[in-house]
Image (cartoon, rainbow, N blue to C red):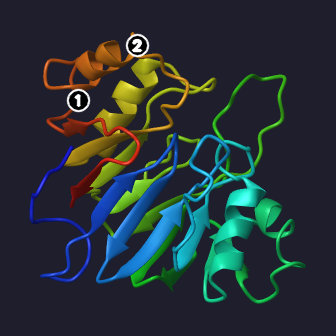
Amino acid sequence: MESNTPTGPGEPGEPTRLTKKGHACVRLEKAGRTLVIDPGGFSEPDAAVGAEAVLVTHEHPDHFAEDRLRAALEADPATEIWTLESVARQLTAAFPGRVHTVGNGDTFEAAGFEVEVHGELHAVIHPDLPRITNVGYLLDGSVFHPGDALTVPGRPVDTLLLPVHAPWNKIAEIVDYLREVRPRRAVDVHDGLLSEQARPVYDRMLGPDGPGVAGADHERLAPGAALTL
């Protein structure tokens, strides 16, 4: 699926290309530089290979797969990772100086993208389960990946990477989250456990005939498909 809307993050004349990878993973390319978010165990083995920067939202294996990160780090000695402490401590010894620990409120530049860190905790899965840390990443003030949380970044968002299906959410919460963030475009992520039968239901609920999605364009990309922001 391809869209050529000439708006999005980056400097004028430098559009960002977003490629959907497996489950919660996305690959963003701008001006010849590449950044990948959440190459986990449900994404392709080479999902992060060739990226200059990799961002990881939290430690759950569908977002953090050590073999995916090692493949990227070993393929290119210039590749660096930004993530929270629970993930960073598993990689720092093997790749000193290339793994950076971040938390809520931090800002940095990675692969030519200006990155803001938002959020602190994973969504509640069940009251009996302890909550782990989770951060979301806002790129160029425009594209937001919340990880496993319904974090509201507190500023307008052009493209929201929307975690549509997980053990910790239900569709009513996703609709309300979309209403609150009010992006121009919502692109499905965290969809690796959805069956083909379920996808039309989510498309209907989140599309233009759904229950009040604040006018956002809803996009569902197959793994490997891309759009230009």
Question: Residue at 58% across / 69% down in the picture?
Answer: 54
Tell me which corner region of the image, top left, top right, bottom left or bottom right, holds residue 164.
top left
Query: Where does the image place residue 109, in percent across and percent down from the top left?
Result: 48, 84
Which numbered marker is on residue 162? Answer: none
Query: Where does the image place residue 22, in percent across and percent down from the top left?
Result: 50, 43
Q: Looking at the picture, does residue 18 appear above or below residue 189? A: below
Question: Residue at 13% across / 65% down in the picture?
Answer: 7
Q: Is residue 76 left or right of residue 199?
A: right
Which numbered marker is on residue 198? Answer: 2
Question: Residue at 21% across / 18% down in the picture?
Answer: 210
Q: Nearer the viewer, residue 205 or 190?
A: 190
Dot 2 lies on which element?
A: loop
Q: Residues within 10 Å of mark 2 (few under 14, many from 20)?
A: few
Q: Is residue 4 left or right of residue 115?
A: left
Dot 1 lies on which element?
A: loop
Q: Residues within 10 Å of mark 1 (few under 14, many from 20)?
A: many
Q: Amino acid at mark 1?
A: Val
Tell me which corner region of the image, top left, top right, bottom left or bottom right, holds residue 208.
top left
Q: Is residue 158 left or right of residue 171?
A: left
Q: Which residue is mark 1?
A: 213
Q: Nearer the viewer, residue 105 or 200?
A: 200
Question: Residue at 52% across / 44% down in the picture?
Answer: 24
**Contact (CB < 8 A) between labels 2 and 1?**
no
Q: Amino acid at mark 2?
A: Ala
